[in-house]
Image (cartoon, rainbow, N blue to C red):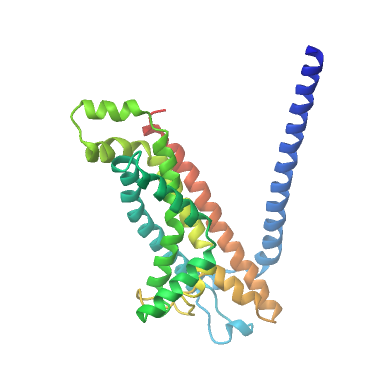
């Protein structure tokens, strides 16, 4: 009997190990195929002129110019959206974990954020477009920032919220014992514990925002110029890739892969930065 149980456990362990290896190989192969395609097709078209110039006349017909407008526009959109999402996330996170702790409002808020996290980005774009029409607004940098902030908000809030739930209760009790109130405990004690998670969540949200096309398609518009105000239409790298691939000219289509390569490099740098910040700020956390 014991021998049969031992054999079954060995088979179970071997099966799980095989599944894990296959999963890793599938993920690695998929990532490798994507990177190989982007690098082989995009690197020949990548040049300093493309990075440092805005599109010129006839750019989508194979003429001169670049995608500087899309690079700066993406940074404006994702940066502004992340900043706004961060400003909104802190009151929500501390509210549901400090003042609404254990109440039905805490569960309702978490459920709402989970639903928001799963909503496709095209729905956010459509919702923002409807609101813009109701308010008489035009596609602009401000509209794109607001929609991206709504898209990134549940990512930041729920990530930080899960970290707060794992903070030792003794830490809060020690703070209360020293005479601190709820607000002081949240700002001076709890905030220090969530620094690594906050940095990671903000950078991951930034990466999601800079790579999203559907939510800004209707709200930020597109322009061959660098935006000079919040009311200006703004280009973005994902839409630049979309429009360049939609042309019948092979030279412009090759530029689309170069644009995708630039976007991939930015996302890769963000991922590496988030890991470094998480490790660096983790020194201030109690584990």
Q: Position of residue 122 (x, y in %)?
A: 54, 68
Location of residue 31 with respect to 192 vertically, above or below: below
The reply, left or right, for residue 233 in relation to residue 14 is left
Place of residue 156 in the rendered image (x, y in percent of width and height, measured from the top left): 43, 50
Is 98 placed left or right of 121 in the picture?
left
View extreme (front): residue: 104
Residue at 63% from the left image edge and 71% from the top image edge: 256
**Quarter of the image that includes the C terminus:** top left
Question: Residue 167 falls in which quadrant of the image?
Answer: top left
Q: In the rendered view of the protein, which quadrant contains the N terminus?
A: top right
Residue 147's quadrant in the figure? bottom left
Tell me residue 135's x, y (percent): 35, 78
Which residue is found at the position 60% from the left and 71% from the top?
241
Specify whether residue 48 is in view.
no
Front position in the image: 112 or 241: 112
Residue 41: image x %, image y %? 70, 66
Count all numbered tags in the image, as a single digit. 0
Q: Above or below — where is 102 with respect to 87?
A: above
User: Can I make out residue 178 in this image?
Assistant: yes
* Residue at the far top in the pictured view: 2
77 to 13, vertically: above or below: below
The foreground one among 246 and 49 is: 246
Q: Is residue 56 above or below residue 142?
A: below
């Amino acid at each position: 009997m014991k021998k049969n149980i031992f054999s079954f456990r060995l088979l179970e362990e071997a099966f799980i190990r095989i599944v894990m290896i296959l999963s890793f190989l599938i993920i690695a192969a998929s990532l490798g195929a994507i990177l190989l395609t982007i690098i082989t097709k995009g690197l020949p078209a990548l040049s300093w002129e493309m990075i440092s110039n805005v599109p010129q006349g006839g750019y989508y017909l194979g003429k001169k110019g670049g995608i500087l407008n899309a690079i700066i526009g993406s940074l404006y959109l994702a940066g502004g959206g992340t900043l706004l999402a961060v400003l909104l996330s802190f009151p929500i996170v501390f509210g549901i974990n400090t003042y609404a702790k254990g109440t039905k409002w805490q569960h309702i808020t978490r459920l709402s954020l989970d639903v928001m996290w799963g909503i496709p980005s095209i729905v956010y774009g459509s919702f923002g477009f409807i609101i813009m029409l109701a308010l008489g607004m035009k596609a602009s940098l401000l509209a794109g920032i607001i929609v991206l902030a709504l898209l990134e908000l549940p990512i930041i809030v729920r990530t930080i919220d899960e970290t707060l739930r794992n903070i030792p209760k003794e830490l809060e009790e020690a703070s209360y014992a020293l005479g601190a109130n709820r607000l002081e405990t949240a700002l001076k004690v709890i905030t220090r514990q969530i620094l690594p998670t906050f940095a990671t969540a903000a950078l991951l949200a930034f990466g999601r925002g800079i790579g999203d096309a559907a939510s800004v398609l209707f709200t930020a518009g597109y322009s061959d110029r660098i935006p000079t105000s919040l009311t200006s239409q703004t280009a973005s790298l994902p839409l630049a890739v979309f429009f360049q691939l939609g042309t019948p000219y092979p030279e412009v289509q090759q530029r689309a892969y170069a644009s995708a390569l630039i976007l991939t490099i930015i996302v890769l740098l963000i991922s590496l930065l988030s890991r470094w910040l998480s490790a660096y700020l983790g020194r201030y956390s109690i584990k």
